[in-house]
Image (tube, rainbow, N blue to C red):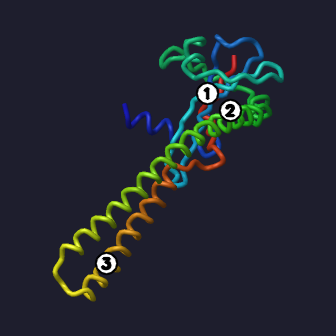
């Protein structure tokens, strides 16, 4: 079954999505199932949101995907494939509006999510700064207990201090890239539904 699912998913080319006939929709109502994703600077998803953009006339409304599924009773094996041609002209005309509505929603989510992540980042960077200070303090204690010549201690101090700074700088950059969101969300159209 997994193989079959993968085959069906690859049946749609780039910039294509399936169109579903859903009799539970109102006359003239169109639904676009969308996924919004906010990545960090490394491209890893931090926030994923599934919404359905509903269009009646020129009015757009976003509805959470589970609510839409419950309202329309959209489940596997419940819709017959009538193999009838569907005129997608109106869907293609309304698609930019659906994407714009989702984009606006995701940017609003991204602003609050980014504020939370910035607060966490600040705390993590403070903890790293404190930990780096403790590492250097521990180095000084080890060198003070060492009975070797002062020239050797100085050389060892410089080497270890440089190494500690390098490790912590790399980790700080990694933390910063991991906890900082990209400014633009990624929006994917998963499917469209018409009556």
Closer to the camera in the image, 12 or 27: 27
* Local SS, label 1: strand
Q: Which mark is residue 51?
A: 1
Closer to the camera in the image, 9 or 119: 119
> Would you say the residues marked 1 and 2 are in contact, meaning their CB atoms lie under 8 Å apart?
yes
Q: Earlier in the sequence, mark 1 or mark 2?
A: 1
Q: Is residue 84 left or right of residue 119?
A: right
Q: Earlier in the sequence, mark 1 or mark 3?
A: 1
Q: At x 40% / y 69%, what residue is drawn? A: 165
Q: Nearer the viewer, mark 1 or mark 2?
A: 2
Q: Is residue 56 left or right of residue 122?
A: right
Q: Position of residue 4 (x, y in %)?
A: 41, 34
Q: At x 60% / y 17%, what residue is drawn? A: 68
Looking at the image, is 123 positioned above or below residue 145? above
Closer to the camera in the image, 78 or 26: 26
Q: Position of residue 116 (x, y in %)?
A: 55, 39
Q: Quadrant of the C terminus?
A: top right
Q: At x 74% / y 36%, what residue is drawn? A: 100
Q: Position of residue 16 (x, y in %)?
A: 64, 40
Q: Disc 3 designates what residue?
A: 157
Q: Which mark is residue 105?
A: 2
* Local SS, label 2: helix
Give the CA separation, mark 2 to mark 3: 53 Å
> Would you say the residues marked 2 and 3 are in contact, meaning their CB atoms lie under 8 Å apart?
no
Looking at the image, is 91 positioned above or below residue 127? above
* Local SS, label 3: helix
Q: Quadrant of the N terminus?
A: top left
**Res 25 quadrant in image:** top right
Looking at the image, is 58 positioned above or below residue 182? above
Q: Which mark is residue 139?
A: none
Q: At x 58% / y 16%, what residue is drawn? A: 67
Q: Position of residue 77 (x, y in %)?
A: 48, 17
């Amino acid at each position: 079954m997994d193989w079959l699912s993968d085959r069906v998913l690859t049946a749609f080319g780039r910039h294509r999505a399936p169109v579903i006939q859903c009799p539970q929709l109102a006359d003239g109502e169109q639904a676009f199932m969308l996924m919004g994703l906010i990545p960090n600077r490394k491209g890893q998803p931090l926030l994923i949101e599934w919404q359905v953009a509903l269009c009646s006339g020129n009015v757009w409304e976003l509805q959470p995907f589970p609510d839409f599924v419950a309202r329309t009773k959209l489940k596997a094996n419940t819709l017959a494939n009538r193999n009838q041609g569907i005129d997608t002209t109106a869907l293609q005309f309304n698609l930019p509006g659906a994407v714009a509505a989702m984009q606006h929603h995701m940017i609003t989510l991204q602003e609050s999510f980014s504020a939370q992540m910035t607060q966490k980042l600040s705390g993590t960077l403070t903890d790293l700064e404190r930990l780096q200070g403790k590492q250097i303090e521990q180095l000084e204690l080890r060198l003070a207990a060492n009975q070797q010549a002062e020239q050797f201690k100085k050389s060892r101090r410089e080497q270890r201090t440089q190494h500690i700074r390098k490790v912590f700088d790399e980790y700080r950059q990694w933390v910063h890239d991991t906890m900082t969101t990209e400014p633009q969300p990624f929006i994917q159209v998963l499917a469209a539904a018409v009556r």
